[in-house]
Image (cartoon, helix red, strand yellow):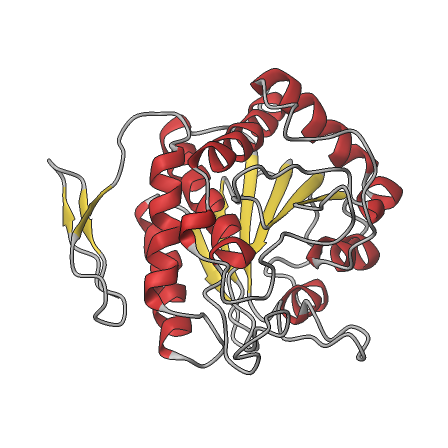
Amino acid sequence: MKVLRCATLNVVMLLLSGCLDTPMKIPTSLGFDGSFAKKLVEMQTKAGPRVLKSKAHQQTGDLIVGLLKQFKFQVVEQSEYRNIIGSINPENKNRILFTAHWDTRPWADQDTENKDKPGPGANDGGSGVAVLLEMARNLSLSQPKIGVDLIFWDAEDLGTSDKEDSYCLGSQYWTKNPHVKNYSAKFGVNLDMVGAAGARFPIEGYSLQMGKLAVEKVLAAASTAGTSAYFERRQGSYITDDHFYIMKALKIPMMDVIQLRSSGGFYEHWHTHQDTVDKISESTLQAVGNTMLAVIKGEDL
């Protein structure tokens, strides 16, 4: 990735695998921009599937790091898996944690064709990353006093159902090797599949069981932000996602904001080649982003 900055136009040139060679204008106004967040999803999918050790994986990781640094975040990268941690006000012990995974699954096992090839991962991976990055842009402008960590997990989607703990390898590694010794946060939110049109986010089971504080904070923020229609108060399925390992190992209350259908199961195009950017809704990204920023504002007193 190459980042070229122009102070007057605030334009960034992002070159990903030679497939994106157009200027990208970063918004300058305060407030979550769903349109820009969708462009960030598109940028990731244009790079290609972010499978570990692939060129798209390397360059998308570089994109995340470059934008975080442009937004004046302190950045730490881990090497076992490329977890990327962006922090604001790192000296403040009063912290909130927001996370999402940025890798894509190496095989589209839920599809009917080409099961052995990776899908684009627009919603499953791309949407959470986009929301975190647009949050980072806003935090660079609002300059909150509270400490905020944004963690982009690697190696979340390598697992198989027959092997316990084979998913979420990046977050499992981080819980044993946090970027700060004795790391702690008041609570946190994990974003997974948060961009599809018509998405609704019930309360994931482990979140309610072990992360009630985080659930209460998110639902209160949704009420403040006017997004309660997206954040349903019904309980959904129990999902072993990145948040589970953080709660289990570090006892930090976490909420997994993840699209779960009322009939059961994940997002319709989960782990298929149809998980494409045209399924992503600016309105959904806007609602999730507004809610997460409201969570921060509610704690930044």
Residue 73: x and y, percent?
41, 47
Residue 72: x and y, percent?
35, 44
Quick one: quadrant of the C terminus? top right
Residue 222: x and y, percent?
63, 24
In the rendered image of this protein, does residue 42 appear above or below residue 257? below
Q: Which residue is more in the foreground, 55 or 279?
A: 279
Horizontally, is 74 left or right of 5 in the view?
right
Find residue 36 and report its image quarter. top left
Name the residue rendered at 58%, 38% in the picture.
Answer: 92
In the rendered image of this protein, does residue 107 appear above or below residue 8? below
Name the residue rendered at 73%, 30% in the picture.
Answer: 232
The answer to whether residue 227 of the structure is visible from this angle is yes
Quick one: quadrant of the N terminus? bottom left
Residue 247: x and y, percent?
79, 52
Horizontally, is 88 left or right of 234 in the view?
left
Q: Which residue is more in the foreground, 254 or 291?
A: 291
Q: Which residue is more in the foreground, 169 or 266?
A: 266
In the rendered image of this protein, does residue 299 appear above or below residue 243? above
Name the residue rendered at 61%, 16% in the picture.
Answer: 224
Horizontally, is 211 left or right of 133 in the view?
right
Residue at the right extreme?
Answer: 209
Name the residue rendered at 71%, 46% in the picture.
Answer: 260
The answer to whether residue 72 of the structure is visible from this angle is no
